[in-house]
């Protein structure tokens, strides 16, 4: 692919150039320090490729997202979440038999070890469910020991039990008894039942809600080297186990700039509505950068034209709320704000568009999912992606521990005894 030339201090260095399968070109700087004594500086990693990966392709200029080569639009229309998990983690679509075995295992491993229920007794009743998710993910290592010989079993356990943990965290927060999984239900239906059934009443999963959840999980399933997937790889590069790495990824996702944005979008819309519904004041604050306020659910590091997930979710929000007969003023407000923002130079000049979090919360609300659980829903969707990244990294030869360098800007040498 040729080389790139770097000239510094009167000397010229040649650096190899690598090309990805979709034409992404990168200068390979792995030997830069050894050859030149220089390092690169890229805080936020906007121009840094941290790895090569064959899982997900994004073209941010054209709004393209593909899992293992398949366009997100086709997957969203045709696939079940469990099929997407298999595809992302194992690289190819499962054949009939493989899918039957995988789905069966995912179902049978949904139950938690009985003693693990005791963990929930210790959490404060007002705990944020993301805190419970993070600690329960690493606690799984205490009950399901990790070994390299058993990676596939741990992958299944993690995927299967995460939804039980999520539902138990919710039940704990409202003081209701835990509902155990039921093996004849799909992945989304099983979760919905554990969330919303109560022992004293019959519960049937609404197929509209089941399909809506299937779609949401699929649209969140992977997004290449985002903050939480990179965290998963970073922690995994120290050879920390799958559960520990996932716990770290959950924590990374929690922040409002990442997965926590879905909760913040709804809180933002609710506040605007409570203040009379005039969003123009709010948009002015955003444009004037007052108190660092941002339009939550807008903007993306990679998408500079549109986020295909947001487009699918906007249509889905209309369809699902209509099917359910829900008239949510937040949906109208969100649409009006989107329209207004997209005609403002501030947003246009900075290529700020709605991202996946702008409309997802409105669908979760219609489904009866409480706002504090939104980011947990993101966890359930993103798990197969994290696992795929962890597994890919573990299987790549020659992966070194992730250990960036820095440009030190602190004090020069001073003597302890001189400062007396
Ligand atoms: N509202 C107002 N201004 C914004 C926003 C926003 N949502 N996002 C970016 N900007 C401005 C930012 O102030 C900066 O302006 P300037 O050039 O004048 O300094 C410019 O746009 C570039 O922003 P940035 O912070 O350098 O962009 P980034 O790529 O580092 O950050 C982001 C991406 C998603 C963190 C950011 O757009 C953001 O904070 N958005 C709101 C939170 C959000 O919705 N997050 C969900 C992301 S998608 C799902 C996921 O991956 O979790």
Image (tube, grey):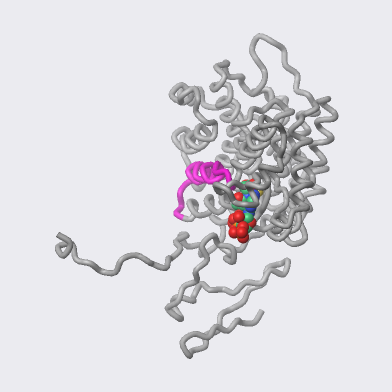
How many numbered marks, from 0 up? 0
Q: Quadrant of the N terminus?
A: bottom right
Q: Quadrant of the C terminus?
A: bottom left
Task: Assign the magenta stretch its main secondary structure.
Answer: helix
Q: Does 239 lie within the magenta span?
A: yes
Query: In screen coordinates, is 85 left or right of 409?
Result: right
Judged from this view, the residue extending furthest toward the bottom is 10
Say if residue 276 shows up in the picture.
Answer: yes
Whole-percent x, y for residue 188 in the image: 71, 31
Whole-percent x, y for residue 328 in the image: 77, 29
Query: In screen coordinates, is 64 left or right of 181?
Result: right
Quarter assignment of residue 105: top right
Q: What residue range appears in magenta?
A: 238-257
Q: Residue at x 60, y 81 (%)?
A: 4
Front position in the image: 408 or 33: 408
Q: Does 413 lie within the magenta span?
A: no
Q: Residue at x 75, y 19 (%)?
A: 204
Q: Residue at x 72, y 48 (%)?
A: 354
Quarter assignment of residue 44: bottom right
Quarter assignment of residue 23: bottom right
Whole-percent x, y for residue 315 in the image: 82, 41
Front position in the image: 50 or 346: 346
Q: Is residue 69 above or below residue 253?
A: below
Q: Residue at x 66, y 32 (%)?
A: 275
Judged from this view, the residue extending furthest toward the top is 200
Q: Is residue 141 above or below residue 178?
A: below
Whole-percent x, y for residue 403 in the image: 44, 61
């Amino acid at each position: 692919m040729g080389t790139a030339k770097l000239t510094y201090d009167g000397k010229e260095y040649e650096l190899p150039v690598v090309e990805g399968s979709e034409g992404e070109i990168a200068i390979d700087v792995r030997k830069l320090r050894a050859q030149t004594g220089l390092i690169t500086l890229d805080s936020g990693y906007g121009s840094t490729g941290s790895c090569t990966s064959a899982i997900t392709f994004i073209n941010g200029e054209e709004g393209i997202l593909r899992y293992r080569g398949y366009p997100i639009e086709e997957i969203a229309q045709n696939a079940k979440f469990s099929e997407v998990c298999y595809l992302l983690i194992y690289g190819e679509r499962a054949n009939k038999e493989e899918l039957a075995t995988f789905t069966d295992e995912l179902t049978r491993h949904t139950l938690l070890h009985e003693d693990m229920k005791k963990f929930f007794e210790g959490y404060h009743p007002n705990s944020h469910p993301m805190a419970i998710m993070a600690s329960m993910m690493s606690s799984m290592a205490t009950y399901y020991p990790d070994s390299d010989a058993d990676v596939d079993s741990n992958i299944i356990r993690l995927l299967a039990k995460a939804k039980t943990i999520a539902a138990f965290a919710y039940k704990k927060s409202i003081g209701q008894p835990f509902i155990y999984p039921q093996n004849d239900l799909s992945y989304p239906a099983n979760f919905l039942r554990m969330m919303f059934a109560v022992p004293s009443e019959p519960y049937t999963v609404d197929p509209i809600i089941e399909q809506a959840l299937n779609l949401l999980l699929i649209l969140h399933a992977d997004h290449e080297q985002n903050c939480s997937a990179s965290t998963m790889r970073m922690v995994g590069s120290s050879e920390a186990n799958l559960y520990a790495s996932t716990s770290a990824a959950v924590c990374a996702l929690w922040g409002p700039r990442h997965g926590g944005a879905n909760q913040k979008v709804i809180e933002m819309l609710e506040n605007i509505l409570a203040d009379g519904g005039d969003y123009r004041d709010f948009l002015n604050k955003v444009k004037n950068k007052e108190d660092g306020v941002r339009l939550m659910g807008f903007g993306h590091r990679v998408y500079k034209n549109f986020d295909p997930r947001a487009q699918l979710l906007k249509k889905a929000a209309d369809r699902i709320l209509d099917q359910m007969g829900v008239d949510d003023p937040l949906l109208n407000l969100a649409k009006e704000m989107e329209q207004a923002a997209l005609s403002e130079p501030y947003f246009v000049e900075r290529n700020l568009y709605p991202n996946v979090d702008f409309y997802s919360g409105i669908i979760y609300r219609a489904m009866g999912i409480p706002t504090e659980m939104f980011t947990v829903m993101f966890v359930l969707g993103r798990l197969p992606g994290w696992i795929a990244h962890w597994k890919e990294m573990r299987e790549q030869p020659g992966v070194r521990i992730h250990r960036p360098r820095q440009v030190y800007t602190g004090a020069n040498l001073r003597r302890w005894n001189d400062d007396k």
